[in-house]
Amino acid sequence: MSIKPVLLTVALLSGMALFAQHNEEVTIEGSYRPKVNKVDKILLQPEAPQPTFEMPDAETHIMEIQHRFPIQLDKISAQPLNTKGRGMEQTKNFLLAGIGTRLSPVFLYKHNSMLTKTLGLGVGVQHYSTWLGIKDHAFSGMMNNAFSLGLSSARFKDLQVNGQVYYKNDVVHYYGLRPSEWTGDEDVFGLLTPRQAYNTIGTHVAISPATTRIRELSHRATFDYHYLFSAFASSEHFADLRYGLAYTNNWWGDKSHPQQLGADLAFQFDAYQSDPAALFMEPATVVSQKTALVAFKPYFEMKDEYYRLHLGFHLDATGATPDSSSRVMLRPDLRGSLFVLDKKVEFYAGLNGGRKMLTYSEIVGENPFVGNGLTLALANVKLGFEGGVRTNIMNTMDLHLGVRYRHTANDAFYLGQGRAIEDQFADNLFVLCYDETKVVSVLANMRWLAFDKFTVDAGLAYNNYTTTLLDHPLYRPTLEGSLKLNYDLNEALSLHSAFLYQGGRFGRMESPYLAVPSIPMKPMMDLSLGADYRVKDEWTVFAKVDNLLHQKYHLFVNYPVTGIEFFAGVKMRF
């Protein structure tokens, strides 16, 4: 899917905890909130929802924001970094509680335990909110709540079964107006800056093989479902069923490197319903859209001591499409790696493509300020290429240089569109527009562990877009970078810093009466400084200054972020 312009996908509760929350101050690859989600800047690695989870380290490095490029780089090298001495024993409970200077409480609790020898339990609860608005703008408070409950069982022969149910509640305000510049009716001002709420109920089930044996079939399957409904008459039912079958055998070569023949099958269904008039306080005009997508991906894999090879293709089919594109499409699915210098250097390349379903849940997760009555199209990657080199130096430094190319039809962008109530107008709503794009990205990542106390994690990306209809790729950066530093001063005190940058973005706002060209937006620059002090093995206090440069850059046109903010709190493991 192509709503991937800016950075930060921030997932709140790793794994079992809480299905990813995307909030940001500097990203489009996550949801746009009035604030960066402070939970994500206080935790470790944000992860996608899983039925089980690992407890975050009580010595968390800076309230991390995960930096993502338009096409995200993989883990840097096949060789893991040497992190001797940094592990901690698993605990059953993790608790984080803190408060920010903008009346921003943050709370996170995660529990993980074994009910029996084969049955595990995971529970996650999260809250984050901001109760003070952005100066000179309509009220911009927001709130995220989430709950997750999961079970993991290994009682079935040769199979691991995981299940999870979850609930999310995300509240924002359409705050892209200035009261000081408003000359109309105050009641209408309130109608143009309403409180929006998105509620999601979902489940995730996964079945995976506990072992893979030679000359035997292995099976794996996942099922995901969610129901999302908003405060303004929009809703979505989404189901995603995936099944994989593989057969492993030693047809030739070393017995320690068998070959595998397999196929992946996926079925997705989305039912979206909305009332375009609800946000305009007009009579109901309900519209609905149903989309189904089936994908079939057969493949053959082989590997040896110094190479890996994956040969396959991607075949997908759908019903009638809004853009009248072909119902059946075939794309390559090829990738390979070559290892040299005692596996310290990996050269890789691959070709891919295929269609991806765009869901209402993804949209409001990335931009909660969208309107109703959206048209959801299938993003169609006509051709994707990736290539590069990964290397590990002295087991303390990972380097990754990569090139990406992607040609996409139905690439989705956020277009600002004004709305009017009682002849009074506001530019604070967004709709989707689609274009055919080509992008070449040059990417670099470095991760360095120095002296077992100092860690450097840096990334840089340059993106060159070609659009067909738009004059610029809206809200997607030409240049983006991140630099994260961590220094363990002693066994108790850790210091952290993070700097994120994005430049070369353009935004666009159109009114019913006037179409205007895209406008350059102020670069995103976000500097954070923080410290963790471990009082005891079980608990740690933390402090953090966010947006130290007090930059009021905009997520979207008319949607600035908050300025400098101080956070403090405690993290406990027990």
Image: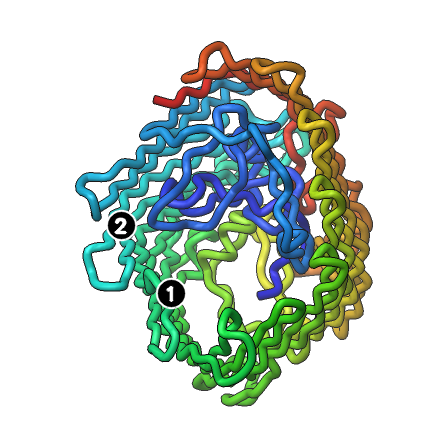
Label 1: few (<14), some or many (≥20) within 10 Å?
Answer: many
Say which mark, if any, is on residue 547: none
Q: Residue at x 74, y 67 (%)?
A: 387
Colour pattern? rainbow
Relative placement, left or right, of 394 versus 415 is right
- The quadrant in which residue 323 appears is bottom right
Residue 412, image quadrant: bottom right
Asked if 461 appears above or below 248 in the picture, the reply is above
Count of marks placed on residues = 2
For residue 143, above or below residue 214: above
**Horizontal arrangement in the rendering, residue 277 relative to residue 63 (left or right):** left
| Closer to us: 341 or 317 | 341
Q: Which residue is mark 2?
A: 152
Q: Position of residue 499 (x, y in %)?
A: 73, 33
* Image location (x, y in percent) of residue 525: 76, 35
Point out residue 380 in the picture as x, y percentages from the top left corner: 60, 76
> In the current view of this chain or complex, which residue is farthest to the front?
254
Under circle 1, the secondary element is strand
Q: Amino acid at mark 2?
A: Ser
- Front residue (pair 210, 58): 210
Could you tell whether 20 is left or right of 562 in the image?
left
Q: Residues within 10 Å of mark 2 (few under 14, many from 20)?
A: many
Query: Residue 429: image x %, image y %?
Result: 58, 51
Asked whether the viewer can see residue 150, the reply is: yes
Height in image: 218 above or below 238? below
- Looking at the image, which is closer to me, 173 or 213? 213
Q: Quadrant of the N terminus?
A: bottom right
**Residue bearing the label numbered 1:** 273
Q: Secondary structure at mark 2?
A: strand
